[in-house]
Image (cartoon, coloured by chain):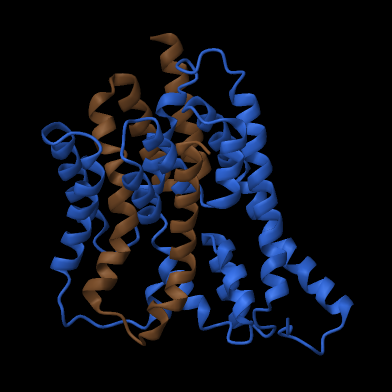
Chain colours: A brown, B blue
Amino acid sequence: MSAMVWIILAGALATYLARIGGHLVLSRFERIHPRVEAGLNAVPAAVLTTLVAPVATTGGPVEWAALVVAGLVALRGSLSAMFLAGAVVLIVLRNLV
Amino acid sequence: MATAEPTSSKSDRMSEFLDGARHGMPVAVASLPFGLLFGALAVQNGMSVWEATLMSATVFAGASQMVGLELFGQTIAPWVIVLSIFAVNFRHVLYSAALGRRVPHWTPFQRAFGFFFLTDPQYAEGEKRAAGAHGLKFIWFMGMAAPIYLFWIVDAYIGATFGNLIPNPHALGLDFLLPIYFLGLVIDFRKRPLWLPVVGASAAASIAAYYLVGSPWHVSIGAAAGVLLAAVVTPANATAHRIEDAAE
C-alpha cells in the first residue's frame, strides 16, 4: 500500500479514537478542570487559524479580497454562504485581473 | 448479540430507523457541496479517486479531511499530518463523553460501532432525541447516520472523478479554496469563550513560526500558542463544568 493510504488509515484511527475516547476516558470524571476545558475548547479554532494566517500572508490582493468578503459573510450567514461568496470573489478576480 | 430493545417488534424498529433517516437527510444534502469539493481537491492534491473515497469512508469528518489534504500537498512528516487530523477533530472527545452517558442501554458493541458516526450534527440531534420522550435508541441513531455517511462517500467519489477533468485549477481558485473554508470554520467557533484572543495568538505565532522556523512547524506552534493562552488566562478556580455542559 502507498504511504498515502497508510496516512489516511492512521488519520481514520485518530479520528475514531477522538470519537470513542471521550466516552471511554473523559466520562470517568464527573467534572472537568476549568483550564483543561478552556484548552480543549480552544483547540479547533487554534489549529484552523494556523491553516489560514500564514497562507494569507503569501497571497496577493485577489486572495485577500476573497478572505475579507468570506469573513464578512461568515459573520452573518451560513458556512455554505460564506464559502460560496469567497469562491465567487476569488474566481471572478482571478479571471479578470 | 443482545439487542437494546428486546421487546420492540420489527415494524417498530423500521419506523425508528426511518425517523432517524428523516433527521439525517437534510444534513446529507447540506454537506453535499463540501463532500464534492473534498473529492475534487483530493485529486488536485495528488490522491487517486479510490484514495479520496477511502478517506471519506474511513475518516468521515469534513474539516479533518480538508486539513489532511492541505498538508498532503506539502512535504510534511506523516505523524504531523495525523496529529493535525486528530487535533481538528478533537472536540469529538467532549461529544463522545457527553453522549456516552445518554446511552447506558446500548450494548458495548453498539457504542463502539455507533460512535464512529459521531459528527457534529449527529451529536446535536442525538442529544435532543435523548432528552425527549423516546430516548436515544441505537436503531434511530443509525437511521440518522446512514444517509449522511452514504452521501458523504458518494460525494467524494463523484467529486474526485470530475476533479480529474478540471483543465485549469488555478483559474477556478482550487488552490485557495481550503484557506477560505478554514476561515469560515474559524469564524463558526466565534461564540466560544476567549475566541478572539485564541485566534489572535494562534495567528501571530503561526505566522512567526512560518517565517522563522518554517513549515510544517507553524501548525503545531501556532495551535499550541492558542491553546496555552486559553488555559493560562482561565482562572484555576473557575466553575468546573459537568461534562455534558462542557460539550455544548
Rendered-image quadrant of the N terminus of chain B: bottom right
Question: Where's residue B235, x and y in %?
Answer: 15, 75
Asked if residue B213 lies left or right of residue B31, the reply is left
Residue displayed at 17% across by 71% down: B234
Using the image as rendered, state which of residue A35 and residue B106 is in the foreground.
B106
Q: In the figure, residue A24 lies in which quadrant?
A: bottom left
Asked if residue A2 is positioned above or below residue A23 in the image, the reply reads: above
Expressed as whole percent of the image width and height from the top left, the position of residue B107 reads 64, 82
Q: Is residue A54 visible?
A: yes
Identify the residue at image location x=73%, y=85%. B2
Instruction: Give the percent coordinates (x, y) of residue A49.
Output: 29, 45
Tell me the quadrant of the picture where the C terminus of chain B can be found: bottom left
Residue visible at 51% across and 41% down?
A: A5
- In this image, A4 relative to B53: left or right? left
Instruction: Tell me how many marks there are.
Output: 0
With B193 as the anchor, is B144 left or right in this view? Answer: right
In this view of the protein, can residue B97 be seen by the observer? no
Q: In this view, does A38 lie above or below B46?
A: below
Give coordinates of residue B77: x percent, y percent.
31, 40
**Residue at the left extreme, as displayed:** B212
Q: Residue shown at 40%/48% (left/top)? A: B185
Extreme front residue here? A1
Above or below for B229 versus B125: above
Left or right position of B157 against A1: right
